[in-house]
Image (cartoon, rainbow, N blue to C red):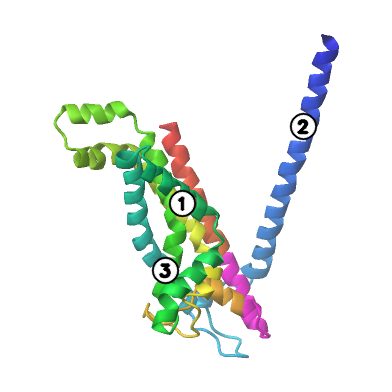
Amino acid sequence: MVDAFKRRKIVNNIVLIFSTFAAIFGILWLIWILGTLIYKGGSTLSWEVFVGNPPAPGDNTGGLKHAIIGQFLIVSIAVVIGVPIGILAGTFLSEYGKNSRLANIVRDISDILMSVPSIVIGTFVYAILVEPFGHFMGISGSVALAIMMLPIIVRTTDDMLNMVPGELREAAYALGATKSKVITSVVYKGAITGIITGVILAVARIGGETAPLLFTSFNNNFLTYNVFQPMASLTVTMYDYAMSPYQYWQKLAWAAAIILTFGVLALNLIGRAIAKWKFKK
């Protein structure tokens, strides 16, 4: 009996040691990446990076205003397209479809879309929006990002609505509320924090995508607000500047990398904070 106890304790300590080393190994890589970004990009960050026009080849002045505004427009339109559709689809699965065959098929498709490489979605949107119109467009990049958002929002909304106690629905029905009223006034209120968390995580997911934008919005060396023309984004601009032979452009690529990284990190932290706050309540 004592030998068995000692053996379990030894095995437990070995697993604990390996788990600790694995965690430290992963954290060290994260610290290394963030440290490199801060070291390389932090020295380049300045007010001019945010408000300056794109630099000319060989010029040592300029900024990323065109890319920052383009990124904001593309992601914002993607949110406007993807969030309502995703929430409504998740509502259908939870409140109407439930365990029907159609609902299960939609859930399976959502799970598959989560694992589809982003470049595949980019080529799909290229085939249906870019090629027929004959040129790249910022709006096509938004559509590609919206498609990437959908499975995350759909599954999050479905799960959060299913966590709302059925007794709340029954109480609302007993008071004479219609199904639509129950959903909007009772179910959504009980799951709103989880839904918002899912939306924030979905936005963080698409915020750093490059591949789908290469096939859809492409890039633009000038500032434009026309989403039906090629539009710059931070991700694609960072890629182009990093591959350029100009040293200042390479520095701007590091600045774009640090802006994207900490922007996505902030969104993830906000999403986790909201989820943790809801759990404490």
Residue 10 x %, y %: 82, 24
Q: Say whether disc 2 or disc 1 marks the residue closer to the N-terminus.
A: 2
Q: Say whether disc 3 or disc 1 marks the residue closer to the N-terminus.
A: 1
Of labels 3 and 1, the one closer to you: 1
Q: Can residue 182 be found in the magenta stretch? A: no
Circle 3 SS class: helix
Q: Say whether disc 2 or disc 3 marks the residue closer to the N-terminus.
A: 2
Amino acid carrying label 3: it is Ser
Q: Residue furthest right?
A: 3
Tell me if label 2 and label 1 are in contact, CB under 8 Å. Answer: no
Of labels 2 and 1, the one closer to you: 1
Residue 29, quarter of the rendered image: bottom right
**Where are the magenta residues, as a range?**
241-259
Circle 1 SS class: helix
The secondary structure making up most of the magenta span is helix
Q: Is residue 179 left or right of residue 149?
A: left
Q: Which mark is residue 109?
A: 1
Residue 66 x %, y %: 46, 79
Residue 142, quarter of the rendered image: bottom left
